[in-house]
Image (spheres, rainbow, N blue to C red):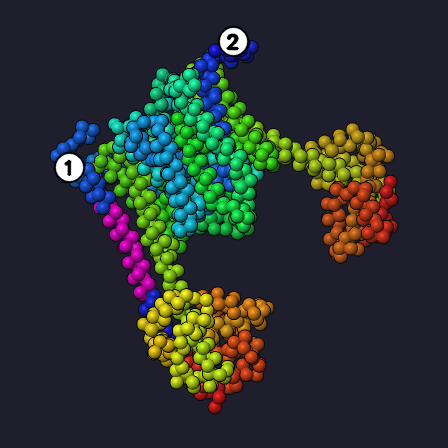
Amino acid sequence: MTGEPFVAWIGQMLPLGFSWSWGLDGWIVVIGSLAAVASSLLGNFLVLRKMSMLGDAITHAVLPGIAVAFLLTQTRSSPAMFVGAVIVGLLTAVFTEWIRGAGGVDEGASMGVVFTSLFALGLVILVQTADAVDLDPNCVLYGSIELTPLDTVSVGGRDVPRAAVVLAVVTVVNALFVLLFFKELRLTSFDPALATTMGFSSKWMHYGLMILVSVTAVACFESVGSILVVAMFIVPAAAAYMLTDRLGVMIAISIALAIVSAVLGHVLALSVPAWIGYRSTTTSGMIAVAAGGLFFAAATLGPRHGVLVKLVRRQLLSLRILCDDIVASLFRGEELEQQPPTATWLAGELFASNWSMKTALAMLRRRGEVADQDDRLQLTHVGRERGQRLVRSHRLWEQYLVDRAGSGAERIHDQAERFEHFTDRNLRDELAKETDTPVEDPHGRPIPDES
Amino acid sequence: MWQVKTSSRNALAGIASCVSGVRLSRGLWVLAMLTVSATVCHARGRPSPETPSPSYAFEWTDSQWGRVLLMKDYNTRIVIFGVAVLGGASGLVGSFTLLRKRALMGDALSHASLPGIAIAFIAANWFGGNEKSLPWLLVGATASGLLGVAVILVIRNQTRLKEDAALGIVLSVFFGAGVALLGVIQQMDTGHAAGLEGFIYGKTASMRAADARLIAITSLIVIAGCLVLFKELKLLCFDEGFAGAQGFPVIALDAGLMTMVVLVTIVGLQAVGLVLMIALLVIPAAAARFWTETMWRMMLWAAVLGTGGSIVGGLVSALFPGLPSGAMIVLVCSVFFFVSMMLGTRRGVIIRLIRRMRLNRRIDRQHLLRAMYEQLEKSSGGPDHAGLAERTNRRISVSLGKLLSMRSWSRRRLSRAIERAVEDELLRIQDGACKLTQAGFTEAARLTRQHRLWEMYLIAYADVATANVDRDADKIEHVLAPEVIDQLEDLLDEQGMTIPVPQSPHGPLSPGETLSPGETPGVLGTDADSTPQRDASGGHP
């Protein structure tokens, strides 16, 4: 194969410690990627519709459908398998809905009842017909992606793994479904009631989605196994959901993440066990782990919704507010011609922790707004201007709240304390105009001028 | 009058208790029938005992049946005992998780335990321990199960993903990690992962006494925990916010509940297998919900159903080789669920259907009687009560067509309502027209009174416009309890509005007419049945 020198070169550059052959590993990666893309295309809508667990339920529940289809046709590659799976998959959705509606059972529980029962039924059928059918429950649960390249069919004169052909067809079907019904899917996912009033049946979209989920689950069984299909359905889509607010972008990101996790998963499966002295491990498991790792990264580092990013942003905001409070209270002290306070005294006054006080002061010193004078804090000229603006905002707000909003004088301080941090020049001018440019606030203290 | 009521209430209570007794025994009866029918059906489906196929390990004889059913085999005894205790404990815990809408937590949790088991196995192998020692593996499973729960809670609370996605992510990624680790274990010298496979499919049939003892101990701990913390957990399930406000340590209780779920799940893994353990947590509890509205009864039902399902499933799988016991237990439980869903005495499908039908019938009858009364009122020439009462003694008949035009109901529905009313001797049919009997007239007056009381209440207190008041009153009048009517009357008394049958607010109405002189409202309030007569005689002497 043509790529082999290139990979050999990579293998030399990066001492990953595994061997690679395009004929085998290349196909494994392609099959894994196709499975991942086909699943995550639909997974976006499962996540958005809060139906992730229905994906899980269907992937378990199609077992009896597959088993019966095997029993009837005695082959693995028959379309009967898809038909059986679609029927059982739809039955799962319908039964779940029925038990929820007619029985008044909570949705999670009704799902649990349906899919465990169907799975048990499938298991019994499999064990009962173990002599007649060569279908290992292990194979259904874990899949055997490593063996898929060996089972080939001839396409256009070339030997292509059967799984790749099947998955490619399913991927195309799913992509067409998403493209053609993008508008309907979006509307029914975000606002089913509106969609129904506009004439799109969210019920039909629901069942259409369920049919494709069943088909995809069956197509992926052989390659990644039933539980890891769930990983492909949910994890890339959930990761993409952490990164963007737009549906189109989310789908694109989820596809990219799906491919990356398939490639990464296979590489990890080959390389990680080698580090501790074993041969390669199950690729499908590692694909799920890789997807989980990508999700973890997206959930922590996502630019808008990432946990870590949100945490840092919140910390920065609270630091900025602390800086504001320090400057404002120094300004008030100067106004009353008190002695400049020490840092420890101020920390106690502002209920600030030692660490955050230190950080805030370091920021203020760096910007040249606060200077030290024998362990006492003093405002510089720049700092005084900032304090003046803050105190002006605060007192204007108090005046406004009493004057215009009709609040009681004893409750306005806390509100003004909150607003002062987010009040800019324009808003201050507006406030001054609204309150007829007062000179004193309701407590009788002077309102400083705009610098 | 009161004595009569009280005694009739006593009688009713007696009947009710009898009925509930009947219900309970019926439940047990169903259970027994299921056992029998399941075994009998299966026996029929099997080839005859004389021609055993090669795949059967031993011949079928009557003594074999007897041995299994009477549990003469030591092995069967252990297996049945183990799964029964497990079924009971998971039924109890499952009730709490079901009511807390966390039914699928067990699903995520059991999958999340796989990497823990694998890591424990590898660790034991590296440090030269016994890698198949069950307690050690269970420690690993518990640790990674709890980690999975923690991750679910973090994802749910800290990101914008919902619980379903959190469950799905933890379930699949943890399981993937477990599968990858199993791939490594299979290459170990002692591995073959044979011991670990059991965690996924269950190995009920090969349960040993030590396993059963472990299950029993864990189940007892869990049952004790459920009973001791019953009040607290109940509060947690129904009103978490209130529990917190009352000073209960909500987070600690939640963690306690989750720990119990983890314990049951982990010991159950090896008995019924990973996927099917979920069923034991969900199905008995969900089935129990159909039989009762009381928490402790629900737990009792769930425990009974869980135990019964496990025993029956275990016995069936012991009787017939080739039926995996885990799957059979789940299937028997789901049969129980289906039966409960259909026949459940509180929330079952059939009982609810009957209840709705009864309500519809009652509503139709009430509509019919009120329509009759209003027709009488109209044909009596105005809202003069005395005149109306006199004239009704002559029993004006109302034609079907007229009744039909009063509401938007189909002819079929109306004629059914009339038929039923005739059966109960509230109506009589004469020449194709309806006539109220004396009892029917009393009832019709009472119903009209209720309707109008409610209308007046809506106008006086709820500020509903007169044009809408009929429709609103129409919806609620059928479900008004006698106590509510009392209260309504008390309220309207203060307004000086109480009258035997208040006049329709839609007709001409002057305040002077509405209040009958000489009537004390208190007397009228409690006894609606006799009002029209009393009105006729006492209201207008």
Give the residues drawn in magenta, as a range: B14-36
Q: Quadrant of residue B105?
A: top left
Q: Quadrant of the N terminus of chain B?
A: bottom left
Residue at 45% x, 86% y is: B536
Q: Residue furthest left?
A: B50
Quadrant in the rendering for residue A63: top left
| Prevalent SS, magenta region | helix
Is residue B529 a member of the stretch shown in magenta? Answer: no
- Name the residue located 74 percent from the left edge and 45 percent from the top edge: A419
Q: What's the residue type where badge 2 is placed?
A: Pro
**Relative to A344, A38 lies left or right:** left
- Give residue B311's position: percent from left, percent from top: 27, 41
> What distance separates the C-alpha of mark 2 from that of mark 1?
66 Å
- The answer to whether marks 2 and 1 sit on the same chain is no
Q: Is residue B480 visible?
A: no
Residue B170: give x, y in percent of width and height.
48, 33
Position in image of residue B289 (x %, y %): 38, 50
**Residue B245 visible to an observer of this rendering:** yes
Residue located 53% across and 34% down the image:
A179
Residue B169 sits above or below residue B245 on the image: above
Number of other residues with Cα within 10 Å of mark 2, as a class: few under 14, some 14 to 19, many 20 or more: few
Q: Is residue B18 magenta?
A: yes
Residue behind mark 1? B48
Identify residue type, mark 1.
Ser
Where disc 2 sits, the SS reads: helix
- Specify the subunit that label 1 lies on: B
Badge 1 density bin: few <14, some 14–19, many ≥20, Cα 10 Å: few
* Position of residue B482 measured from the top left corner of the image (x, y, whole percent): 44, 70
Per the rendering, the mark at residue A5 is: 2
Give whichever of B361, B39 is nearer the camera: B361
Q: Which mark is residue B266?
A: none
Tally of numbered tags: 2
